[in-house]
Amino acid sequence: MMDISKEQFHEYIDKAFDSLPEPHRSGVKNVAIVIEDEPTEKQRVELSLHCNQTLLGLYQGVPLPERQGRQSLLPDVITLFKLPLLMNSADEEELYQNIRHTLWHEVAHYYGLNHKKIHELEK
């Protein structure tokens, strides 16, 4: 498994976020993007992940369409899981692409998009 510094990982996240399509990028408000090594046991249980399943990213919050105009004081959270992303990447370019794909996927959940719509927009 390749290894990169936390700073480089953050740079890839920043670059990936800056590459997201408009208006999706500029519409993201009050969302923290954090890095964790792996999903917690609680997250694995909540998502019904089996021991052989992995998770690259996770959106936690209330999607925009479900807010009915209400704003939360606490930010929504997008977590990117460093170790699974590294394990699924052969080199730094593939790592960047995996980070970008995962970040886009989680941002799309922030907008309330389901998996089918996310995949349609990726084409």
Image (cartoon, rainbow, N blue to C red):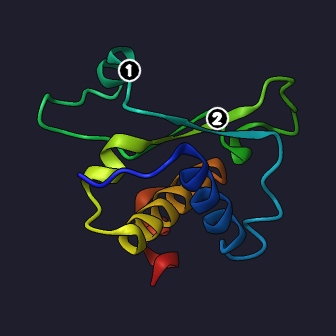
Return the disc, 1 or 2, that comes first in the chain's sequence. Answer: 1
Question: Of the numbered discs in the image, which one, if any, rests on residue 122?
Answer: none
Type of the residue with mark 1 = Thr
Q: Nearer the viewer, residue 76 or 121?
A: 76
Q: Residue 60 sits in which quadrant?
A: top right
Name the side, left or right, on which 3 lies relative to 57: left
Where in the figure is residue 31, as x and y percent of width and height? 74, 41
Q: Which of 17 and 118 is in front in this view?
A: 17
Where in the figure is residue 17, as x and y percent of width and height? 67, 63
Secondary structure of the residue carrying numbered label 1: loop
Mark 2 closeness class: few <14, some 14–19, many ≥20 residues within 10 Å: some
Q: Nearer the viewer, residue 3 or 64?
A: 3
- The reply to whether the C-beta atoms of the residues labelled 1 and 2 are less than 8 Å apart is no
Type of the residue with mark 2 = Val
Which residue is pictured at 72% across the width and 69% down the height? 18
Name the side, left or right, on which 121 lies relative to 111: left
Where in the figure is residue 59, as x and y percent of width and height? 55, 40
Name the side, left or right, on which 116 lies relative to 73: left
Residue lying farthest top?
42
Name the side, left or right, on which 90 lies relative to 76: left
Q: Badge 1 is on which residue?
A: 40
Secondary structure of the residue carrying numbered label 2: strand
Which residue is pictured at 83% across the width and 27% down the height? 72
Above-or-below relation of 12 to 82: below
Where in the figure is residue 12, as x and y percent of width and height? 57, 61
Question: Of the numbered discs in the image, which one, if any, rests on residue 77?
Answer: 2
Above-or-below relation of 97 to 34: below
Residue lying farthest bottom?
123
Which residue is pictured at 76% across the width and 75% down the height? 22
Q: How many labels does the image show?
A: 2
